[in-house]
Image (spheres, helix red, strand yellow):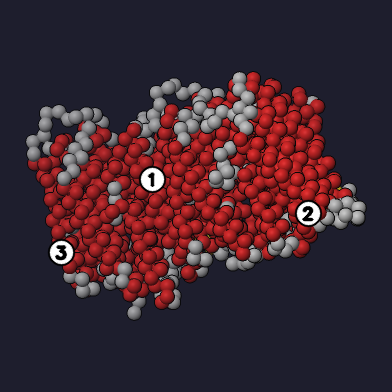
Amino acid sequence: MSYIILYALLGVGLFVLGLYALIIHAHLLRKILAINVMGTGVFLVLVALAARHQDAPPDPVPHAMVITGIVVAVSATALALILMLKVYAATGKTELHDGKPD
Amino acid sequence: MTGDLLGIPWAVLLILLPLIGGLACFLLPSLSKSLGLLCALAILVAVGGLGWQLAENGAQRYAIGGWGAPLGIDLYADGLSLLMLVMAALVGLGVSVYSSAYFNGDKARHFWPLWLFLWAALNALFLSADIFNLYVTLELLGLAAVALVALAGGADALNAAMRYLLVSLLGSLFYLLGVALIYHGFGSVDIAILAQRIEPSPAAWSAVGLMSAGLLLKTALFPMHFWLPAAHASAPAPVSALLSALVVKAPFYILLRLWLEIFSPTGAAPGQLLGQLLGLLGAAAVLWGGIQALRQTRLKLLIAYSTVAQLGYLFLAFPLGTSIAWKGVFYLLLSHALAKAAMFMAAGNILYFCGHDRITDLDGVAQRLPLTLAAFSLAGVSIMGLPPSGGFVAKWLLLETALRSGQWWWAAILILGGLLAAAYIFQVIGHAFTQADAPAETGLVPARMEWTAVMFAFAAILLGFFATDAFELIGIGAPTSGVSGG
Amino acid sequence: MNLAQSLPLLVVASSLVPGAIIFFLDEKQTVARIFLNMAGALIKLALAGVMLWGIVHGYHYEIRLPLLPGIDLFLRAGPLAMLFVTLSATLWLLTTIYAIGYLEDSPHRSRFFGFFSLCVTATAGLALAGNLLTFLLFYELLTLATYPLIVHRGTEEARLAGRNYLIYTIGGGALLLLATVWLYTLTGTLEFTARGFLSGLDAVHHPALIVIFVLFIAGLGVKAALLPFHGWLPQAMVAPAPVSALLHAVAVVKAGAFGIVRVVYDVYGIEFAADLGVTLPLAILASATIIYGSVRALFQDDLKRRLAFSTVSQVSYIALGVAVVGPIATIGGLVHLVHQGIQKVTLFFCAGNLAETLGIHKVSEMNGVARRMPWTMTAFTISALGMIGLPPLTGFISKWYLGMGALDAGQNWVIFILAGSSLLNAAYFLPIVYAAWFKPSPSTWPHERSFGALETAWPLLLPPIITAALTLGLGLLASSPISPLEWVRFIASREFAP
């Protein structure tokens, strides 16, 4: 039981770490990576909690969810990357400029 | 014959139609306008079919592929889903008509598949019966919406789209973490099953907290609205209309479902507290959004901040909690969608005509674009909550509940919010009536774009006359059965 | 739903439908526009006549459409409603004729007449409203429909006046909404009932009812230009003359006064209101407004502003008549609803004629003007004397009943208010009349225009002559069975049945 909790806590740790990075880093690539770390954290939680008992076979449903989640995350990352390149092309910056459009 | 029509799985069609339409537009870009419009009409028919089905047989549940929960994917449709689907179908049809004149060439080639995919995600979301499917559809919706914002090109729009994407992904991840906790704690993701199994526990409450936080971020509830004005204002006009009318409502719908069917019936003290907190944030949004709207110099930003304020009203029902208050919120969802779509389209027409949307330079618009100004003004009547309009019905019901339960401070917020709305809307109208020296150059805005805006605004007004019929339809399957009556 | 029942709806539609069509007319389609305007006005007047006849003969006209869960859109042609409908239908017809003449060749006429018709639609609707929700609906519609008329000229001054108008009236509307919803949560009904529907309510709610009453009076007082809420009215004078006539005599100000009458008689019930102790403060507020408006009018050189402050003063007679509590004062207040309308519309027509024909906007420019425009100034003089309350004109009838009513109710102090107000009325009207008739005229007028044989265009001349004749005629024939006074007696007898 304990190492299941350990994995789950590790997942939560990754989530928090990613959130922290997302907030403090300005560079868009780092932000995108941070989001991915957070996602991985959530997936880890899902997979870890799927093992309800140490001996019983794990619950398949969270695995299905994780696979779906990974597909979604890959497409989101692709969109984020292309958008980042476009922002760079349009503004010459790899950061979001603050404030409102003028 | 009628039996055959009733047997058609209209709900499934509602997801397949835009999906296939989107693919077809992607493969046959030269036909995308006609395909898109055709698809929009077909969806309207399908929503009609579903509504008929619900009226005849009550709430519906479909097991796609016959697997059934927990492994298969279930669809569920009741009065609340129907309301959201009707809203999407109406706004979708109007936006399609508007866009067929607004977008041309390359932009059109990109717009139609994205828009139809967005529509598919939206319909799927409103029909989802489990909280994981809601996550998937919400994420797809977000991706399509971001791509549509980026369609405007230009540094501002790309910047806003990027921020929107990050916020959207962040919100979804919070939500998903909550889903993981719920599944672990109660062994299901199906809303109906969860409604029976859920019990107040630390795990349940942390899940509620995580999911709500994610959804509130995506609904742009004050103070998490920071991303919304830029994204909604810098997108192309029809996309702005979609975002404000439909897309922000999707996470709110999920919150509503969770609250009405899973969290609220548990009725524990933390729920009361959360309800009060949401109400407070909503009130702050109403005031802050209104004041910010008043301070804007650009029309589209003004309308975007108005969305922030109007979204705030939706949260006033959480502390009130009666079925009458929820009815008010349901009606506000619909009337705001129509009115706000009309406003963004009107702003789009003005931009199209003047080349700018600076409010102080709107002189003489009333003379040169009378239909557009009429659309803006009529939509404004509903946004201000003046009778007769859908906005008025909603405001009345919320006011009634607030005063009946002695919580007069929510009533004060409703009244103040209405006054602020009047102030920012008439700021625009006042400038539009002034005399202009510039020669009139009418005829530049396609008639289709002006008339769609007018029709939406008119629909928002007409809603004021059909409240009793609408509430009968929304009541199918008793979506508010979990909360206390009267 | 048979035809007879739908008559109230038709009265509302008779200006709504032409108005909606007029919006889409081209500027140059003058004939079509005039036809629609006149047809709507005549049909409305005819329908009002039919309903008057029907009510006298015991028919009932009412129609309901579901609007909110539990509350209907409810139109009912009761005696009080018909008083206001007939007044507004008559004056609308005249004002339409006047406006057609006044706005000849000016820009944006389709827009103007569209909103003009919407205004009268709203007025007819709130006159016929059978419950507070319906009243509220048309009250707000009236606000929205008058705004474009006030800013019609499109100048910066007009825009600011419009903005001020909205600040007052939207604020007032919000208070009215709050009061209405609050009342609904206490009673579960909003339907106007003779002698009110609140007296049965538990005494626990009486403090709430007093607060609600204050909210009502504040919300309605904005349009009725009661004392702290009158600021928008003089500013709104930038609007074209027919709009001023409409605001002061037919629609806006009257809507507020009519609303106060409705709330006091048919929501609270006059006796219950007196028991609550809210009528005396209302009487004092009305009296203060009467004196304040008159004093301010004294010092205005701009003719329309002087008339505007005169309206502030005169409309409060209606509220005063209501608040004095008694059958005779009620008659005085209600009949003044009609009399003030007819007199004030004449004065604004005349002011418009002076401005259009000679370019005169100021009292100080009016020396000898009666020799140049005798018909206009005769009409002006009759109405001004009516305002002062000279017998046998209509204004005298109002003031007589108000005074007798006050004595009857034991409120002798009201007599001093009436006397003081009449003196002030004389002080700000008689110098105008004297200067116009007896002072030597200047060699040139500010902006003279020639209209052939007549002193001004006939559509501008006919309406004031008719309304001045009514001022005289309704005063002389006050005791005849078809006069407004008799109708008002009939209404009052319902409120004070033994």
- Closer to the chain start, of discs 3 and 1, is 1
Please tell me whether residue B153 is drawn above or below residue C325 in the rendered image.
above
> What residue type is disc 3 on?
Phe
In the rendered image, which residue does mark 2 sit on? B183
Q: Position of residue B359 (x, y in %)?
A: 45, 32
Q: Identify the disc placed on residue B256.
A: none
Please tell me whether residue A31 is drawn above or below residue B247 in the rendered image.
above
> What residue type is disc 2 on?
Tyr
Quadrant for the C terminus of chain B, please: bottom right
Q: Identify the disc placed on residue C416.
A: 3
Direction from residue C283 to residue A69 in the image, left or right: right
In the rendered image, which residue does mark 1 sit on? C166
How far apart marks 3 and 1 lie (CA) works out to 35 Å
> What residue type is disc 1 on?
Leu
**Given the image, what chain letter belongs to the residue carrying mark 1?**
C
Task: Check disc 1: other Cα within 10 Å, few if <14, some if 14-19, many if 20+.
Answer: many
Q: Nearer the viewer, mark 3 or mark 1?
A: 1
Q: Secondary structure at mark 1?
A: helix
Please tell me whether residue B14 is drawn above or below residue C77 in the rendered image.
above
How far apart marks 1 and 2 lie (CA) works out to 54 Å
On the same chain: label 3 and label 2? no
Q: Residue at x 8, y 39 (%)?
A: C439
